[in-house]
Image: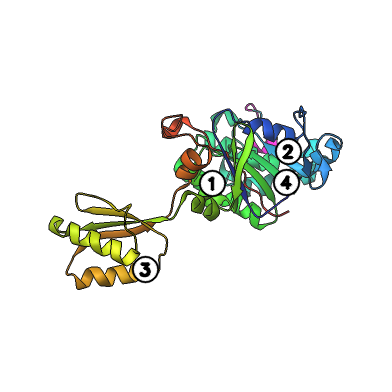
Amino acid sequence: MFVPVQSMVCLVSNGAGKTTTIGMLATLLRPDAGSARIFGHDVVKESQIVRQLIGVTGQYASVDESLSATENLIIFSQLLGLGRVEARQKADELLEEFGLMEAAKRPLKNFSGGMRRRLDLAASLIAQPPLIFLDEPTTGLDPRTRTQMWDTIRRLVKTGSTILLTTQYLEEADQLADRIAVIDHGRVVAEGTVDELKASVGTSSLQLSVQNLQDIEVARQIVERVLQIQSNVSYEVGKITAPMANADLVTDLLIAVREAGIHLAEMSVQKPTLDEVFLITITGHGVKEDAVSASFESKKVKVGKA
């Protein structure tokens, strides 16, 4: 059963089956076994109904490079049953929404990768489907264009769309998802909110640096006493790292350090990251396997309430 929620992200390693999953949910591929439903409709037995409820943007733009942005959107609109006037109006609205009006009459072969991605997303919104599949919509985009795409996705969710989104970027999952499902070797191995998954890794960690290296041992003793821990405190040159289950103790720690006359260079409390969730705790793979940042792939599914 596919249940729409505010937003949802799936993180998966390379070859875990994210594009195949999208293909089956979008009725483009027939599943070998099992079942799936979109808004209560079986994707195999009621595929025609499902197709009326979804929009799909794949990893590669499905637009015609020999035509202009306006011409592409008009053709897609007419294929979806809009009349000539309605198609032109819808094209103008979408070009304005995605910041493409200035380039509306230019052939797509002169578009940048980011502009093509935005146009492809615009085409998937012509019929305003309640569910939109976005397969890696920001891959290859520059930081500015990626941020613009994030803003567009947030607006779609706020206006009631359900979005299933895959991505290569854990930061994107962290930024956009209300819920995350982690898939490893074709199986969902964890699901929850971003905070819930981070909490599954363990507690937050305290990082503290002292200005004078001679104070490091006293600072370590204060950290152990205030945080009520007997071990797991590691310290490098001028830096202490310790688990911190109760963030309320930060104030007590600062007071104790000041009373001891110790001057701090820096102090922070950090939650576990999605990298730790994905690479270590959930999939069980260490940083040695595909974890060199650019070589692993995460899958993000963003779902907004329809």
From mark 2 to mark 1, how far is it between C-alphas? 33 Å
**Which x, y percent locates residue 144?**
46, 45
Q: How far apart are marks 4 and 3 (CA)?
A: 45 Å
Q: What residue type is labelled 3?
A: Leu
Residue at point 78%, 44% (across, down): 38
Q: How many neighbours does mark 3 have within 10 angstroms: few (below 14), some (14-19), or many (20 or more)?
A: few
Amino acid residing under circle 1: Ala
Residue 74: assigned label: 2
Is 98 contained in the magenta span?
no
Residue annotated with mark 4: 131
Q: What residue type is labelled 4?
A: Leu
Query: What segment is highlighted magenta in the picture?
Result: 65-73
Q: Is residue 13 left or right of residue 306?
A: left
Q: Is residue 265 visible?
A: no
Q: Earlier in the sequence, mark 4 or mark 3?
A: 4
Q: Please say if 118 is above or below 197.
A: above
Q: Nearer the viewer, mark 4 or mark 1?
A: 1
Nearer-N-terminus badge (2/3): 2
Q: Earlier in the sequence, mark 4 or mark 2?
A: 2
Residue pointed to by mark 3: 249
Q: Are marks 4 and 3 in contact (CB under 8 Å)?
A: no
Q: Is 276 on the left-hand or right-hand side of 260?
A: right
Q: In the rendered structure, which disc, 4 or 1, sits on the residue that comes first in sequence?
A: 4
Q: Name the residue under label 1.
A: 173
Residue 236 shown left or right of residue 89 in the figure: left
Q: Mark 4 or 3, which is nearer the eye?
A: 3
Disc 2 marks a residue whose amino acid type is: Ile
Task: Pinpoint residue 70: horizontal percent, then vertical percent.
Answer: 67, 38
Q: In which quarter of the image is the N terminus?
A: top right
